[in-house]
Image (cartoon, rainbow, N blue to C red):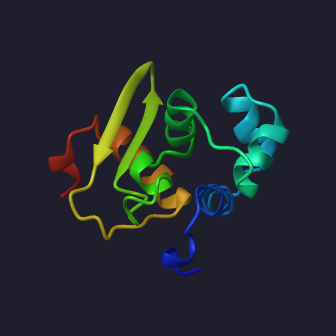
Amino acid sequence: MNIKELDTFGKRIEFLLDSKELQKQELADAINLSPTTISNYLSGKRSPDLDTLKKIADFLNVNADFLLMRSDDYQTHFSRNINGKLVEIDFEDETIHLTEKEINDLFKKLEAVGFDIKKLL
């Protein structure tokens, strides 16, 4: 799907859920909302408050600007909790789009070398 066709908050959430092979129920459970509320976001009947928007962006691992249609780049920031520590990666090249598997592989490789990026180069 062309990113430009994702012209509503709901379409962008649906796109991300599909691309990450997640169900609405999983999003609802993760951010403590009902599946009906998520469905209302997807259909455009409701919009989230700022706190909920942040939770959605964090859960889907995207920049809130993508959800708000201020940017078409949805994968420039990744974060994972590894061994009790938050590990974050920011890409300056906004054209990088990785699959969920590629993201997980990247974090595994980083963890394997003790997060010493020079060892991967």
Q: Is residue 19 above or below residue 90?
A: below
Q: Going 18% across and 58% down the picture, which residue do you hit?
A: 121
Q: Quadrant of residue 11?
A: bottom right
| 6 with respect to 29 (left or right) | left
What is the residue that sits farthest to the top in this orientation? 84
What is the residue that sits farthest to the right in this orientation? 36
What is the residue that sits farthest to the left in this orientation? 118
Q: Nearer the viewer, residue 104 or 40?
A: 40
Q: Going 55% across and 69% down the picture, which residue do you hit?
A: 7
Q: Nearer the viewer, residue 1 or 9?
A: 9
Q: Is residue 67 above or below residue 34?
A: below
Q: Nearer the viewer, residue 67 or 103?
A: 67
Q: Is residue 63 visible?
A: no
Q: Position of residue 118 (x, y in %)?
A: 15, 49
| 105 with respect to 23 (left or right) | left
Q: Position of residue 20 (x, y in %)?
A: 63, 57
Q: Position of residue 105 (x, y in %)?
A: 46, 53
Q: Position of residue 59 (x, y in %)?
A: 56, 38
What is the residue that sits farthest to the bottom in this orientation? 2
| 119 with respect to 94 (left or right) | left
Q: Going 51% across and 63% down the picture, which residue do you hit?
A: 99
Q: Nearer the viewer, residue 82 or 56?
A: 56
Q: Is residue 106 above or below residue 29?
A: below
Q: Is residue 97 visible?
A: yes
